[in-house]
């Protein structure tokens, strides 16, 4: 995790506030289209990825589902988990 690029790193590079970078990455109309494109291209180039943990804290929603089962050695339990995953994956839930 030491080599990850953060919004603050991008803000330092472009000499602006992290909120400006966030708006540019989220296509906010308040940010000039050329500036948005430049920031988005650079973010892709350096491998920027949104921090899902910090976003879940900000939004107060982790989109995480915990399932407790007695064992995963039987077909019945694994098929239930696979079914949950198939149905909920389009919602971008994280499975633990």
Image (tube, helix red, strand yellow):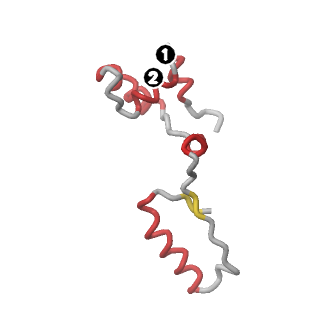
Question: Label 1 belongs to which residue?
Answer: 16
> In the rendering, at what x and y percent does residue 46 appear?
48, 30
Would residue 73 be found to the left or right of residue 35 on screen?
right
Residue ID at (57%, 86%): 76
Badge 1 crowding class, 10 Å Cα cut-off, few under 14, some 14 to 19, many 20 or more, is few
Would residue 21 be found to the left or right of residue 35 on screen?
right
Give above or below for 5 relative to 53: above
Instruction: Assign a secondary structure to mark 2.
Output: helix
Query: Which image quadrant: the C terminus?
Result: bottom right
Farthest-out residue, left: 33
Query: Which image quadrant: the N terminus?
Result: top right
Q: CA distance from mark 1 to mark 2?
A: 7 Å
> In the rendering, at what x and y percent does residue 65 appear?
58, 63
| Disc sitting over residue 20 in the figure | 2
Residue ID at (59%, 82%): 77
> In the rendering, at what x and y percent does residue 39 appear?
40, 24
| Disc sitting over residue 71 in the figure | none
Farthest-out residue, right: 70
> In the rendering, at what x and y percent does residue 5 appear?
55, 31
Farthest-out residue, front: 60
Residue ID at (43%, 30%): 45
Give above or below for 29 relative to 62: above
Instruction: Assign a secondary structure to mark 1.
Output: loop
Q: Are marks 1 and 2 in contact (CB under 8 Å)?
A: yes
């Amino acid at each position: 995790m030491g080599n990850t690029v953060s919004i603050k790193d991008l803000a330092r590079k472009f000499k602006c506030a992290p909120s400006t970078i966030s708006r540019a990455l989220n296509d906010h109309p308040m940010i000039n289209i050329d500036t948005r494109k430049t920031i988005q291209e650079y973010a892709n180039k350096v491998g920027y990825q949104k921090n899902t943990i910090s976003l879940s804290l900000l939004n107060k929603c982790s989109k995480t589902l915990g399932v407790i089962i007695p064992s995963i050695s039987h077909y019945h339990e694994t098929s239930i988990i696979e079914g949950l995953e198939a149905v909920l994956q389009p919602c971008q839930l994280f499975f633990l």
